[in-house]
Image (cartoon, helix red, strand yellow):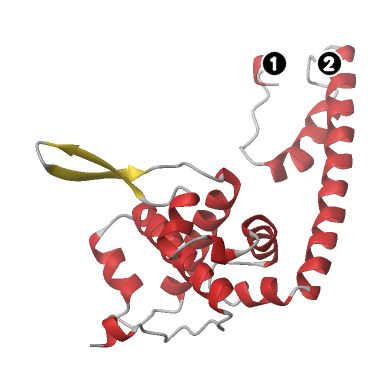
Amino acid sequence: MAEFGLIIPQGIDHIATRVPELIEDATDELPGSFRLLVERLLDHLKVLDKQVIELEVQIKDWHRKSELSRKLEQIPGIGPVTASALVATIGDAKSFENGRQLAAWMGLVPKQQSTGGKSRLQGISKRGDTYLRTLLIHGARSAILAAQRKAQQADSWLTKLLQRRSPNVVAVALANKNARIIWALLAHGREYRPDYMTAKAAT
C-alpha cells in the first residue's frame, strides 16, 4: 500500500481499522485487482484472529485446571499463556540441578569468554527455547512497568537495578530471576512468596 502512497501506523490494530477505509475510498487510484487482493488478505487476517481467540480460550481453560500453572501465575509478569507454556515445556523441573541450569536452558545467562586467564561476561547466550525466553522477557517488561506505576519501595532489588541499568537489561535480569523462581516452585513444590529471602541473603 505504501507503493501507492497509502501509509498507516504500524500495528495490527491499525490494519483492521484503517485499511478497509482506504481501499473503499473511491478517490484512491488503486487497481481493482489490488483492492480485491487486500480484501482477501483482510478476510484471512480475521480468520486467523478468530483462531487465536479460540486457542487462547483453550489455553486458559487448561491453565485453570493445572495446579502447577496456577502456581506460576503468582509470579509478577507471568500470565496464563506463559505459565501453561512453562509447565508444558519444562516437564519435570527436577531434571535440572538448580535454577541457573533452567535459566541457561532458556538462554537467559550471560555468555562467558575467557582470555589470558580472565573471564568476561557478554550478553545472554540466547540458546535454548526461544519461545519461553521471549515470553519471560516480555513478561518482565510488563512487571517493570507495573512496579514503576506502583512506586515500589526505594530499597527494592528492582528499583535499585533500574537506577543503574537500562530497562532492557533489567528486563533480562528479571526474566533470569523469574526462571530461577520457577525452578524452585516446580522442583520443590513451593508457593510463591514476594518477600521470600534465602538464608544467605538474609544474613
Report the side of 25 relative to 87 (left or right): right
Residue 10: image x %, image y %?
61, 37
Q: Amino acid at mark 2?
A: Phe
For label 1, the residue is 4
Mark 1 in CB contact with mark 2 (< 8 angstroms): yes
Tell me: residue 25, above or below residue 199: above
| Disc nearer the start of the sequence (1/2) | 1
Mark 1 crowd level (few <14, some 14–19, many ≥20, 10 Å Cα): few
For label 2, the residue is 34
Mark 2 residue element: helix
Residue in view at x 83 percent, y 37 percent? 45
Tell me: residue 142, above or below residue 184: above
Give the quarter of the figure containing the N terminus: top right
Q: Using the image as rendered, state which of residue 73 and residue 139 is in the foreground.
A: 73
Mark 2 crowd level (few <14, some 14–19, many ≥20, 10 Å Cα): few
Tell me: residue 150, above or below residue 23: below
Q: Using the image as rendered, state which of residue 52 and residue 187 is in the foreground.
A: 187
Report the side of 21 relative to 196 (left or right): right
Q: Residue 178: which numbered mark, if any?
A: none
Residue in view at x 70 percent, y 63 percent? 84
Residue in view at x 47 percent, y 66 percent? 178
Quarter-wise, where is residue 17 in the image? top right
Separation of disc 1 and disc 2 at Cα?
10 Å
Q: Amino acid at mark 1?
A: Phe
Mark 1 residue element: helix
Report the side of 75 relative to 149 (left or right): right
Q: Using the image as rendered, state which of residue 98 and residue 64 is in the foreground.
A: 98
